[in-house]
Amino acid sequence: MTTPLIDPFLRPISYLRVSVTDRCDFRCVYCMSENMTFLPKKELLTLEELDRMCSAFVGLGVEKLRITGGEPLVRKGIMTFFNAMTRHLESGALKELTLTTNGSQLARFAGDLHAAGVRRVNVSLDTLDEKKFADITRWGRLPQVLQGIEAAQQAGLRVKINTVALKGFNEDELFTLVNWCAARDMDLTFIEVMPMGDIGNENRLDQYWPLKDLRATLRQQYSLTDLPLNTGGPARYVALEETGQKIGFITPLTHNFCESCNRVRLTCMGELYMCLGQEDVADLRPALRNNPHDDAPLEQAIRAAIARKPKGHDFDYSRAVVDGKMSRHMSHTGG
Ligand code: SAM
Ligand code: SF4
Protein backbone atom coordinates (compact mmCIF):
# COMPACT_ATOMS: atom_id res chain seq x y z
CA MET A 1 0.00 0.00 0.00
CA THR A 2 1.23 3.53 -0.73
CA THR A 3 1.56 5.92 2.17
CA PRO A 4 -1.06 8.69 1.92
CA LEU A 5 -0.07 12.32 1.40
CA ILE A 6 0.40 14.00 4.78
CA ASP A 7 1.85 17.49 5.07
CA PRO A 8 4.32 18.73 7.74
CA PHE A 9 1.41 19.90 9.93
CA LEU A 10 -0.11 16.41 9.80
CA ARG A 11 -2.95 17.44 7.48
CA PRO A 12 -3.90 14.63 5.09
CA ILE A 13 -4.14 15.90 1.51
CA SER A 14 -7.22 14.33 -0.05
CA TYR A 15 -8.50 17.09 -2.32
CA LEU A 16 -6.99 18.34 -5.58
CA ARG A 17 -8.31 21.33 -7.48
CA VAL A 18 -7.23 21.36 -11.09
CA SER A 19 -7.27 24.36 -13.36
CA VAL A 20 -7.55 22.93 -16.88
CA THR A 21 -7.25 26.25 -18.71
CA ASP A 22 -6.51 29.87 -17.87
CA ARG A 23 -8.88 31.03 -20.61
CA CYS A 24 -12.43 32.16 -20.11
CA ASP A 25 -15.40 33.41 -22.07
CA PHE A 26 -16.13 35.99 -19.32
CA ARG A 27 -13.99 38.81 -17.92
CA CYS A 28 -15.33 39.23 -14.38
CA VAL A 29 -14.03 42.53 -13.07
CA TYR A 30 -12.67 41.08 -9.79
CA CYS A 31 -10.95 38.20 -11.59
CA MET A 32 -9.44 39.45 -14.83
CA SER A 33 -8.57 42.60 -16.67
CA GLU A 34 -10.37 43.08 -19.96
CA ASN A 35 -7.23 42.51 -22.01
CA MET A 36 -5.76 39.35 -20.60
CA THR A 37 -2.70 37.69 -22.04
CA PHE A 38 -3.26 33.97 -21.86
CA LEU A 39 -0.67 31.21 -21.89
CA PRO A 40 0.51 29.94 -25.25
CA LYS A 41 -1.33 26.66 -25.92
CA LYS A 42 1.91 24.65 -25.93
CA GLU A 43 2.48 25.58 -22.28
CA LEU A 44 -0.70 23.77 -21.25
CA LEU A 45 -0.70 20.19 -20.12
CA THR A 46 -2.35 18.08 -22.77
CA LEU A 47 -5.52 16.22 -21.84
CA GLU A 48 -3.45 13.03 -21.58
CA GLU A 49 -0.98 14.75 -19.29
CA LEU A 50 -3.80 16.08 -17.13
CA ASP A 51 -5.07 12.51 -16.89
CA ARG A 52 -1.63 11.20 -15.83
CA MET A 53 -1.18 14.00 -13.34
CA CYS A 54 -4.62 13.54 -11.71
CA SER A 55 -4.28 9.77 -11.75
CA ALA A 56 -0.97 10.06 -9.88
CA PHE A 57 -2.69 12.12 -7.18
CA VAL A 58 -5.56 9.64 -6.99
CA GLY A 59 -2.98 6.87 -6.65
CA LEU A 60 -1.56 8.77 -3.68
CA GLY A 61 -4.91 8.99 -1.92
CA VAL A 62 -6.63 12.05 -3.36
CA GLU A 63 -10.36 11.30 -3.17
CA LYS A 64 -11.87 14.46 -4.51
CA LEU A 65 -11.10 16.27 -7.76
CA ARG A 66 -12.55 19.67 -8.55
CA ILE A 67 -12.05 20.84 -12.12
CA THR A 68 -11.85 24.58 -12.55
CA GLY A 69 -10.09 27.30 -14.53
CA GLY A 70 -10.44 29.84 -16.19
CA GLU A 71 -13.63 28.38 -17.48
CA PRO A 72 -13.13 24.60 -17.53
CA LEU A 73 -15.88 24.01 -20.09
CA VAL A 74 -14.19 26.17 -22.74
CA ARG A 75 -11.15 23.86 -22.81
CA LYS A 76 -11.30 22.02 -26.12
CA GLY A 77 -12.02 18.31 -25.70
CA ILE A 78 -12.57 18.63 -21.95
CA MET A 79 -15.14 15.81 -21.92
CA THR A 80 -12.36 13.41 -22.93
CA PHE A 81 -10.68 14.28 -19.66
CA PHE A 82 -13.87 13.93 -17.58
CA ASN A 83 -14.62 10.60 -19.25
CA ALA A 84 -11.09 9.43 -18.45
CA MET A 85 -11.61 10.23 -14.76
CA THR A 86 -14.74 8.06 -14.66
CA ARG A 87 -12.52 4.99 -14.25
CA HIS A 88 -11.30 6.27 -10.88
CA LEU A 89 -14.89 6.78 -9.72
CA GLU A 90 -15.73 3.28 -10.86
CA SER A 91 -12.75 1.76 -9.06
CA GLY A 92 -13.82 3.57 -5.87
CA ALA A 93 -10.45 5.33 -5.53
CA LEU A 94 -12.06 8.66 -6.35
CA LYS A 95 -15.09 9.58 -4.26
CA GLU A 96 -16.07 12.75 -6.07
CA LEU A 97 -15.47 14.38 -9.44
CA THR A 98 -16.84 17.87 -9.63
CA LEU A 99 -16.38 21.27 -11.24
CA THR A 100 -16.70 24.99 -10.74
CA THR A 101 -18.07 26.79 -13.76
CA ASN A 102 -19.51 30.11 -14.81
CA GLY A 103 -22.41 28.13 -16.28
CA SER A 104 -22.17 29.55 -19.79
CA GLN A 105 -21.58 26.14 -21.41
CA LEU A 106 -23.63 24.00 -19.01
CA ALA A 107 -26.62 23.65 -21.29
CA ARG A 108 -24.30 21.91 -23.75
CA PHE A 109 -22.39 19.73 -21.30
CA ALA A 110 -24.72 18.92 -18.38
CA GLY A 111 -25.87 15.55 -19.72
CA ASP A 112 -22.34 14.42 -20.60
CA LEU A 113 -21.01 15.51 -17.23
CA HIS A 114 -23.66 13.48 -15.45
CA ALA A 115 -22.87 10.49 -17.65
CA ALA A 116 -19.18 10.83 -16.70
CA GLY A 117 -20.12 10.54 -13.01
CA VAL A 118 -20.29 14.20 -11.98
CA ARG A 119 -23.09 14.68 -9.47
CA ARG A 120 -22.56 18.20 -8.18
CA VAL A 121 -21.46 21.46 -9.79
CA ASN A 122 -20.71 24.87 -8.38
CA VAL A 123 -21.97 27.67 -10.58
CA SER A 124 -20.71 31.20 -10.03
CA LEU A 125 -23.47 33.80 -10.11
CA ASP A 126 -23.08 37.21 -8.52
CA THR A 127 -26.35 38.88 -9.45
CA LEU A 128 -29.79 38.10 -10.86
CA ASP A 129 -30.02 41.43 -12.61
CA GLU A 130 -29.30 41.14 -16.31
CA LYS A 131 -27.66 44.54 -16.66
CA LYS A 132 -25.53 44.13 -13.52
CA PHE A 133 -24.54 40.65 -14.71
CA ALA A 134 -23.31 42.03 -18.02
CA ASP A 135 -21.40 44.75 -16.14
CA ILE A 136 -19.67 42.47 -13.65
CA THR A 137 -18.76 39.69 -16.12
CA ARG A 138 -18.12 42.18 -18.99
CA TRP A 139 -18.74 39.45 -21.60
CA GLY A 140 -21.34 37.22 -19.94
CA ARG A 141 -25.08 37.05 -20.54
CA LEU A 142 -27.39 36.12 -17.68
CA PRO A 143 -30.07 34.18 -19.64
CA GLN A 144 -27.41 31.80 -20.98
CA VAL A 145 -26.22 31.03 -17.45
CA LEU A 146 -29.76 30.57 -16.14
CA GLN A 147 -30.45 28.11 -18.95
CA GLY A 148 -27.25 26.29 -18.04
CA ILE A 149 -28.31 26.00 -14.41
CA GLU A 150 -31.70 24.65 -15.42
CA ALA A 151 -30.11 22.13 -17.79
CA ALA A 152 -27.78 20.98 -15.03
CA GLN A 153 -30.67 20.39 -12.64
CA GLN A 154 -32.61 18.57 -15.32
CA ALA A 155 -29.63 16.34 -16.00
CA GLY A 156 -29.63 15.36 -12.32
CA LEU A 157 -26.71 17.50 -11.18
CA ARG A 158 -26.96 19.15 -7.79
CA VAL A 159 -26.14 22.83 -8.21
CA LYS A 160 -24.58 25.08 -5.61
CA ILE A 161 -24.32 28.78 -6.35
CA ASN A 162 -21.16 30.73 -5.50
CA THR A 163 -21.54 34.47 -5.15
CA VAL A 164 -18.63 36.85 -4.72
CA ALA A 165 -19.68 39.46 -2.15
CA LEU A 166 -19.05 42.87 -3.66
CA LYS A 167 -19.52 46.10 -1.80
CA GLY A 168 -22.11 48.37 -3.35
CA PHE A 169 -22.85 45.78 -6.02
CA ASN A 170 -24.80 42.84 -4.66
CA GLU A 171 -25.26 43.62 -0.97
CA ASP A 172 -28.84 44.59 -1.81
CA GLU A 173 -29.46 41.24 -3.50
CA LEU A 174 -28.70 39.11 -0.46
CA PHE A 175 -32.30 38.06 0.18
CA THR A 176 -33.20 37.96 -3.52
CA LEU A 177 -30.38 35.48 -4.11
CA VAL A 178 -31.20 33.40 -1.02
CA ASN A 179 -34.87 33.19 -1.98
CA TRP A 180 -34.14 32.46 -5.64
CA CYS A 181 -31.85 29.59 -4.63
CA ALA A 182 -34.38 28.33 -2.07
CA ALA A 183 -37.07 28.15 -4.75
CA ARG A 184 -34.75 25.91 -6.82
CA ASP A 185 -33.45 23.78 -3.94
CA MET A 186 -29.92 25.12 -4.27
CA ASP A 187 -27.38 25.92 -1.58
CA LEU A 188 -25.54 29.20 -1.78
CA THR A 189 -22.05 30.26 -0.73
CA PHE A 190 -20.83 33.82 -0.42
CA ILE A 191 -17.15 34.45 -1.08
CA GLU A 192 -15.17 37.44 0.11
CA VAL A 193 -13.20 39.01 -2.69
CA MET A 194 -9.52 38.06 -2.50
CA PRO A 195 -6.44 40.01 -3.64
CA MET A 196 -5.50 37.89 -6.62
CA GLY A 197 -3.81 39.32 -9.71
CA ASP A 198 -3.81 42.65 -11.46
CA ILE A 199 -7.34 43.60 -12.48
CA GLY A 200 -6.66 46.81 -14.30
CA ASN A 201 -8.28 49.96 -12.91
CA GLU A 202 -10.46 48.22 -10.31
CA ASN A 203 -9.57 48.78 -6.67
CA ARG A 204 -9.73 45.81 -4.28
CA LEU A 205 -10.71 47.82 -1.23
CA ASP A 206 -13.58 49.32 -3.18
CA GLN A 207 -14.81 45.79 -3.87
CA TYR A 208 -14.41 44.35 -0.39
CA TRP A 209 -17.64 43.57 1.48
CA PRO A 210 -16.64 41.74 4.66
CA LEU A 211 -19.03 38.90 5.41
CA LYS A 212 -18.75 39.09 9.17
CA ASP A 213 -22.11 40.88 9.39
CA LEU A 214 -23.92 38.57 7.00
CA ARG A 215 -25.14 36.19 9.69
CA ALA A 216 -26.76 39.07 11.58
CA THR A 217 -28.42 40.32 8.41
CA LEU A 218 -29.75 36.87 7.51
CA ARG A 219 -31.14 36.57 11.03
CA GLN A 220 -33.50 39.45 10.26
CA GLN A 221 -35.54 37.06 8.11
CA TYR A 222 -34.43 33.52 8.93
CA SER A 223 -33.61 31.28 11.89
CA LEU A 224 -30.04 30.11 11.52
CA THR A 225 -28.36 27.00 12.84
CA ASP A 226 -24.57 26.82 12.68
CA LEU A 227 -23.49 23.62 10.97
CA PRO A 228 -20.43 21.83 12.30
CA LEU A 229 -19.72 20.56 8.80
CA ASN A 230 -16.02 20.63 8.13
CA THR A 231 -15.13 20.26 4.49
CA GLY A 232 -11.44 20.95 5.10
CA GLY A 233 -11.95 24.18 3.21
CA PRO A 234 -12.51 27.81 4.06
CA ALA A 235 -16.32 27.66 3.99
CA ARG A 236 -18.40 27.82 7.15
CA TYR A 237 -22.08 26.91 6.85
CA VAL A 238 -25.39 27.75 8.46
CA ALA A 239 -28.74 26.13 7.78
CA LEU A 240 -31.82 28.28 7.24
CA GLU A 241 -34.62 26.61 9.13
CA GLU A 242 -37.39 28.07 6.97
CA THR A 243 -35.98 26.87 3.64
CA GLY A 244 -33.72 23.94 4.60
CA GLN A 245 -30.90 25.58 2.62
CA LYS A 246 -27.25 25.62 3.50
CA ILE A 247 -25.64 29.03 3.26
CA GLY A 248 -21.84 29.11 3.17
CA PHE A 249 -19.39 31.87 3.94
CA ILE A 250 -15.89 31.87 2.55
CA THR A 251 -14.05 34.47 4.57
CA PRO A 252 -10.35 33.97 4.02
CA LEU A 253 -9.69 37.54 5.11
CA THR A 254 -11.62 37.51 8.35
CA HIS A 255 -11.33 33.90 9.42
CA ASN A 256 -8.46 31.55 9.79
CA PHE A 257 -9.38 28.27 8.12
CA CYS A 258 -5.93 26.93 7.45
CA GLU A 259 -5.69 24.43 10.33
CA SER A 260 -7.92 21.94 8.58
CA CYS A 261 -6.74 22.56 5.01
CA ASN A 262 -6.81 19.31 3.03
CA ARG A 263 -6.22 20.66 -0.49
CA VAL A 264 -3.65 21.62 -3.06
CA ARG A 265 -4.05 23.23 -6.48
CA LEU A 266 -2.68 22.20 -9.83
CA THR A 267 -2.45 24.75 -12.63
CA CYS A 268 -3.00 24.01 -16.29
CA MET A 269 0.80 24.15 -16.72
CA GLY A 270 1.44 21.45 -14.15
CA GLU A 271 2.51 23.68 -11.28
CA LEU A 272 1.35 22.72 -7.83
CA TYR A 273 0.38 25.47 -5.41
CA MET A 274 0.38 24.15 -1.88
CA CYS A 275 -1.53 27.21 -0.62
CA LEU A 276 -3.87 29.61 -2.46
CA GLY A 277 -2.45 32.52 -0.47
CA GLN A 278 1.28 31.88 -0.86
CA GLU A 279 3.61 32.17 -3.85
CA ASP A 280 5.51 28.91 -3.27
CA VAL A 281 5.01 26.55 -6.18
CA ALA A 282 6.35 23.19 -7.28
CA ASP A 283 6.71 22.54 -11.00
CA LEU A 284 5.60 18.95 -11.57
CA ARG A 285 5.85 19.14 -15.35
CA PRO A 286 9.52 18.09 -15.71
CA ALA A 287 8.91 14.95 -13.64
CA LEU A 288 5.91 14.19 -15.84
CA ARG A 289 7.41 14.99 -19.26
CA ASN A 290 10.90 13.58 -18.70
CA ASN A 291 9.48 10.23 -17.66
CA PRO A 292 6.70 9.39 -20.08
CA HIS A 293 6.52 5.72 -19.05
CA ASP A 294 7.35 5.91 -15.37
CA ASP A 295 5.19 7.65 -12.76
CA ALA A 296 7.59 7.09 -9.86
CA PRO A 297 9.50 10.40 -10.38
CA LEU A 298 6.19 12.27 -10.59
CA GLU A 299 4.97 10.69 -7.36
CA GLN A 300 8.26 11.64 -5.73
CA ALA A 301 7.90 15.22 -6.93
CA ILE A 302 4.34 15.34 -5.55
CA ARG A 303 5.50 14.06 -2.15
CA ALA A 304 8.36 16.57 -2.07
CA ALA A 305 5.90 19.38 -2.84
CA ILE A 306 3.45 18.32 -0.12
CA ALA A 307 6.35 18.33 2.33
CA ARG A 308 6.60 22.09 1.62
CA LYS A 309 2.94 22.92 2.28
CA PRO A 310 2.92 26.03 4.49
CA LYS A 311 0.91 26.44 7.65
CA GLY A 312 -1.33 29.18 6.26
CA HIS A 313 -1.93 32.20 4.08
CA ASP A 314 -1.03 35.87 4.49
CA PHE A 315 -4.01 37.73 3.05
CA ASP A 316 -4.72 40.89 4.99
CA TYR A 317 -6.83 43.95 4.19
CA SER A 318 -6.69 45.26 7.75
CA ARG A 319 -4.40 48.25 7.31
CA ALA A 320 -6.24 49.71 4.33
CA VAL A 321 -3.57 48.35 2.05
CA VAL A 322 -3.87 45.00 0.38
CA ASP A 323 -1.16 42.96 2.06
CA GLY A 324 -0.35 39.45 0.99
CA LYS A 325 -1.52 40.34 -2.50
CA MET A 326 -0.86 37.55 -4.95
CA SER A 327 0.50 38.50 -8.35
CA ARG A 328 -1.23 35.60 -10.08
CA HIS A 329 -4.88 35.70 -11.08
CA MET A 330 -7.51 33.46 -9.55
CA SER A 331 -8.02 31.99 -13.02
CA HIS A 332 -4.43 30.72 -12.87
CA THR A 333 -4.92 28.56 -9.77
CA GLY A 334 -8.64 28.16 -10.20
CA GLY A 335 -9.91 29.65 -6.92
N1 SAM B 1 -14.78 30.23 -14.37
C1 SAM B 1 -15.27 29.42 -13.32
C2 SAM B 1 -16.21 30.20 -12.44
O1 SAM B 1 -16.26 31.43 -12.54
O2 SAM B 1 -16.89 29.56 -11.63
C3 SAM B 1 -14.20 28.77 -12.48
C4 SAM B 1 -12.98 29.58 -12.14
S1 SAM B 1 -13.26 30.99 -11.12
C5 SAM B 1 -11.62 31.63 -10.97
C6 SAM B 1 -13.57 30.21 -9.55
C7 SAM B 1 -14.25 31.08 -8.52
O3 SAM B 1 -13.36 32.09 -8.11
C8 SAM B 1 -15.50 31.77 -9.00
O4 SAM B 1 -16.56 31.50 -8.10
C9 SAM B 1 -15.15 33.24 -8.94
O5 SAM B 1 -16.25 34.02 -8.63
C10 SAM B 1 -14.10 33.25 -7.87
N2 SAM B 1 -13.16 34.38 -7.94
C11 SAM B 1 -12.47 34.86 -8.99
N3 SAM B 1 -11.69 35.89 -8.64
C12 SAM B 1 -11.87 36.08 -7.32
C13 SAM B 1 -11.35 36.97 -6.36
N4 SAM B 1 -10.44 37.89 -6.68
N5 SAM B 1 -11.78 36.86 -5.08
C14 SAM B 1 -12.70 35.92 -4.72
N6 SAM B 1 -13.23 35.04 -5.58
C15 SAM B 1 -12.83 35.12 -6.86
FE1 SF4 C 1 -13.94 33.63 -15.91
FE2 SF4 C 1 -14.60 32.50 -13.63
FE3 SF4 C 1 -12.76 34.46 -13.68
FE4 SF4 C 1 -15.28 35.07 -14.17
S1 SF4 C 1 -14.47 34.25 -12.25
S2 SF4 C 1 -13.51 35.72 -15.39
S3 SF4 C 1 -16.01 33.28 -15.17
S4 SF4 C 1 -12.57 32.48 -14.56
Image: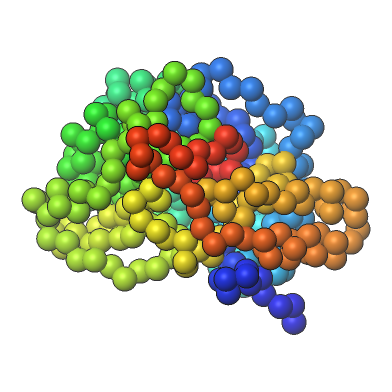
In the image, taking residue 300 as reference, residue 71 lies left or right, namely left
* Quarter of the picture holding the N terminus: bottom right
| Nearer-the-camera pick, 287 or 61 | 287
Quarter-of-image position of residue 301: bottom right
Looking at this rendering, what residue extends furthest in the front direction?
319
Residue 95 against residue 80 in the figure, above or below? below
| Nearer-the-camera pick, 311 or 242 | 311
Residue at point 34% right, 51% down?
A: 254
Looking at this rendering, what residue extends furthest in the left direction?
220
Residue 71 picture location, percent across and down: 55, 36
**Can residue 239 be seen?**
yes
**Can residue 184 be seen?**
no
Residue 281 picture location, percent across and down: 68, 49
Looking at this rendering, what residue extends furthest in the bottom direction?
1
Residue at point 28% right, 68% down?
A: 227
Quarter-of-image position of residue 61: bottom right
Give the colouring mode of the picture. Answer: rainbow
In the image, taking residue 73 as reference, residue 149 lies left or right, namely left
Residue 56 picture location, percent across and down: 74, 62
In the image, taking residue 318 as reference, residue 224 lies left or right, namely left
Residue at point 29% right, 20% down?
A: 131
| Nearer-the-camera pick, 126 or 316 | 316
Q: How many marks?
A: 0
Residue 141 picture location, percent across and down: 39, 24
Residue at point 25% right, 58% down?
A: 245
Residue 181 against residue 56 in the figure, above or below? above
